[in-house]
Image: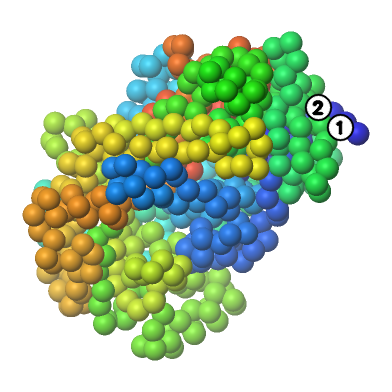
Amino acid sequence: MTATYDFVIVGAGTAGCALAARLSEDERNRVCLIEAGGPARHPFIHVPALVGPAILHQGLGWGLTTEPQAALNDRRLPLPRGKVVGGSGSINGMAYHRGHPLDYDDWARAGNAGWDWASVLPLFRRSEDNANARDPAVHGQGGPIHVAHIPKPNPLNSAFLDAFAELGGFAPCADFTGLNPEGYGLRQGTIHRGRRHSTATAMLAPALPRPNITLVTRAQVRSISVENGRATGVEIHEGGSPRHIAAGREVLLCAGAIHSPQLLMLSGIGPADHLRALGLPVHAALSGVGGNYHDHPALALTLEMRDATSYGLSWRALPRNAWSVVEYLFARRGQLASNVFESTAFIRSSDALDRPDIQIAFQPARRNPDGFPLPRGHGFAMSVVNLYPKSRGRIRLASCDVRDAPRVDAQLLADPADAAPMLWALRLARRLSQARAFARFAAREALPGAACQSDADLLAYLRRAAGTAHHPVGTCRMGVDEEAVVDPQLRVRGISGLRVVDASVFPSIVGGNTNAPVVMVAERAADLILGRI
């Protein structure tokens, strides 16, 4: 049996939930939103401090890894992607950043008219309900997504900020989503009344009672149906049975930077030689599909301490932890209401740069060397992040079966230029950890360890320990050249009735977390589809 809707949205992640909510505001639009995972009911999703267990929970993600990475000692890196309503927005760190204003001006200069900072700022404001930053020219109040600082950050955050002041040469920043997001300070998150505030919670849930929106869960899209150069619907697996869902107006692909290019290729849209080698038809020969893959490389300096100030599991912290459970259950406050990512810094590794190229993300909790999802014992970490890596990877199909994960060759740190800013930042993080502001905690450097001092030693640590910030983008790049996959209206080149709306369309990565920019992309897509711009 075939069901027909005006708009069929593939993927109920950050973009899909926001887009479905906006399109269904017009009661004339019949909207179907399809998600491979189930409803977002698991407590790991909703309790902010359980972000670690949420990311690692097999029932909430796809279980993806990269191909062996040559620049990282042939390690396979985990690629946590949400397989649940809310997508990766249901398992991410809830950090709210927009990137730097110049990032969007770069998009526009590359030929993407309407994506400059002045044009996208109103879209950021529209979705935002900011509790702390009140400048109406920059921030929104009354939007669906609650944005705020953590009410009672861990005291170790003060030491982190004081260490920057002690070293000198850096300025405090009160608003990392403002016009000049540079310096050190407290960061905001998408947490409301002690619970994660994703687009699934903030936008989709209020929209679901509308009669013109249908949410289909635990249904994996096999391919997009293409007839005479037009997307006409999707083929899905639901309950073990195939089914066709027809789109009268458009198919909107919101499956993310890994699965959107996979579905395009499975539908005969992508590099022609690759598709033919797998016996797939070629409806649109787009060599850029799956290319331009990039992510933020990240590396942690970790410290351990006996002092129980940090978040963590220990006998010394047992009374506080027991109280935090009571406090959270009855008031939705306390350390369980924190996402742990409470302060950060955006800085330049060179004065010659026009914007910060490094983030140092502070976590007032011990990093477990065995990967256990909750901090055992006490300590803190500083993750150094290269905000603008030069390395580019690609995604290719493993087979013609959507159930086989695509091959993701991230090429992380393949460009030698990507390592130098991270090593500079790692040395700075070490100096911060040794500042007087941290002295009273008597912390000991665990990784890379005091013996790791030379450039060669630090580079070796980078090779064996670096990962990513889990911000993959760019694999269905927006642009006007022959390698672009979508045009500035997000329409797939060569196929009518089909758009991509997620982080895969980013021409280049932004200087910060990618969740808020994805919401912005969904807001602009809604305006484009509804003819408002």
Sequence-wise, the earlier of marks 2 and 1 is 1
Residue drawn at 26 percent across, 50 percent down = 463
Left or right of 349? Residue 95 is right
Rendered view: 85 above or below 51: above
| Display coloring | rainbow
Left or right of 387? Residue 114 is right
Q: Residue furthest right?
A: 1
- Quarter where residue 522 is shown: top right
* Residue 11 badge: none
Quadrant of the image for the C terminus? top right
Left or right of 352? Residue 32 is right
Q: Secondary structure at mark 1?
A: strand
Residue that label 1 marks:
3
Quadrant of the image for the N terminus? top right
Mark 2 belongs to which amino acid? Answer: Ala
Residue 134 shows up from this direction: no
Residue 270 picture location, percent across and down:
56, 21
Residue 241 shows up from this direction: yes
Left or right of 19? Residue 464 is left
Q: CA distance from mark 2 to mark 1?
A: 6 Å
Residue nearest the viewer, comparing 473 with 409: 409
Mark 1 belongs to which amino acid? Answer: Ala
Residue that label 2 marks:
246
Residue nearest the viewer, comparing 504 with 364: 504
Residue 500 picture location, percent across and down:
59, 27
